[in-house]
Amino acid sequence: MIHLLRTVALAAVVFAASGTPVRAGIAVAVEYYDAALDHYFVTAIPAEVAALDGGQFPGWVRTGLSFNVYAAGSATPGSTPVCRFYGSPAAGLDSHFYSASPAECQMVLQRFPTAWLLESYDVFEVFLPDLATGQCPTGSIPVYRAWNTRADSNHRYTTDLTVLQAMLAKGYVAEGYGPGPAPTAMCSPSTGGGNAPVCAPSASDTAPYVGTTVTLFANCSGNPTSFTWGGCPGVGGRCDVTSSVPGTLTYTVAATNAAGTGAPAPIDLHWRALPPVPQCGMVVTTNTAPPVVGSSAVLAAACSNTPTSYNWTNCTSAGAICPAQSGTAGPVNYSVSGSNAGRTGAPASRSVNWVATTPPPPGLCSQYPSYLFSDLGWTDALIHSRDFTDAPGFAWNAVWVVKLSVPPDASSTQTGKISIAEFDGPPTSREVTISRFPCDFRTPDPSGNNGPLLRDESAGPTEFFVLGASSGGKVGLAPGLDYYVNIRNWNASTSSISCDSSIRCDALFFISLP
């Protein structure tokens, strides 16, 4: 999370330094906490606030505390820029360090060049206290810095003296300038001198789907006592909003303190229409056809419209791949559906008939040491031989058979495509056939009766097909029949296996239906 935020932060700093004017004024440094890391993090960068509030980095939540700063590039008279360093995970860190002292920034840069990486000399601006007394300038209040004294070095920054005391009681050490148990690290500009609050609202999601709930956060300076929302029924510093129609809607918030009410600050939410419901198929891959009790069957969901979650029956998985086993012989019905934006498509079902003893190899597969069998059915799919981890799988000298079952009512004038490529390994020459028989690498026979309909050999073979009779150099697949795409690691020029027996030469198979 923190490393990704570093990229967002640098982008924001570069933007500010590019010559684009930056409006001087109060900004808000918002504090977050990750319980798993036991780390604190503060940021006044709107892109980081939006990413954190939007759940882009799970685990980080607001503590409810913040303090005022000046935005980067403000150059308010008397203020000083705050540098920010990122602690490299390679050094056992993964945290941030802030300092308002140019001398301390340079010391960190010189003493820890590989452990603490400089992100920016100016992430926001504050005042520097008197280095001897820790006294803050008029119009500002102390920001305390507490260090956790652990190897994963993390600091907490707060203007609340009771929070500092609580951290010290937990074993933290106070750092800063001036005597006593509460030295001052930097000074936060106060808005108590007659300034109305300035707000910079953020959202948990700025491009939500219609029907979802989005939380808006006010993010206002000046210690507001009340808030007024426009377009959202909120009464405090946060407001929940939803929309039933797509489009861009603008919401506003204005905050009030003793000095008055600030100007309404806007934020746009770009509501998106719900995507189409996922339509799924299922591919079943086994070491034998059918699978043997005690072995594995890898079930792969092949779904359209980008599911965000999958729902399996009789198989346990949170993703698109689900390994299945059975302790008894007989058919088991499996199903899977895909969900996106809160909607779930119709389930795709497949029955797998588990057998007690190893069945004879299908077709011509007895000629080869082993075979991997994928029953694809008839669906657009991308499958990987590496997903099947049981030996022998798609071994270096094995055959991968992908069964296609063309529905009796299939009809289209479009062209389908089949592609095979190396997956996570060196380029490998492969022989591919399309046949009415599994493991068929005989001389091609256009009729399909005594050999495959086509044969190809290359490092990345791609074949096109049509429904019905062959035409235009494209092989024809008849509705209502089964076909087999047979794949093996083979170099035709040397008549030898093209994969080194000491490694896996896994492939991916992609089919686009006509």
Image: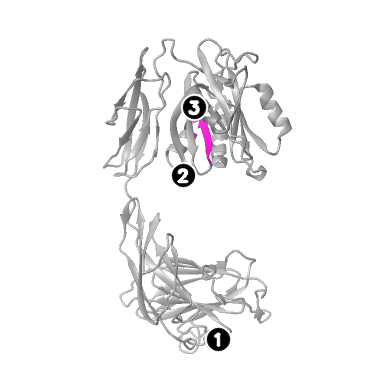
x and y percentages locating residue 7 in the rendered image: 56, 38
For image coordinates 32% across by 46% down, the residue present is 273
The nearer-to-camera label among 1 and 2 is 2
For image coordinates 55% across by 27% down, the residue present is 16
Q: Which numbered disc, 1 or 2, marks the residue that appears first in the sequence?
A: 2
- Res. 167 in view: yes
Q: CA distance from mark 1 to mark 3?
A: 80 Å
Name the image quarter holding residue 398.
Answer: bottom right
Q: Relative to residue 56, is residue 365 depicted above or below?
A: below
Question: What residue sits right under mark 3 in the picture?
Answer: 163
| In the foreground, 258 or 411 | 258
Q: Is residue 29 magenta?
A: no
Name the image quarter holding residue 487.
Answer: bottom right
Left or right: 452 as drawn, with respect to 273:
right
Q: Which numbered disc, 1 or 3, marks the residue that appears first in the sequence?
A: 3
Query: Magenta span covers which residues?
Result: 38-48
Question: What residue sits right under mark 1 in the picture?
Answer: 443
Q: Give the crowd class for mark 1: few <14, some 14-19, many >=20 residues within 10 Å.
A: few
Residue type (three-letter) at the residue carrying disc 2: Pro
Q: Relative to residue 187, is residue 366 depicted above or below?
A: below
Q: Are marks 1 and 2 in contact (CB under 8 Å)?
A: no
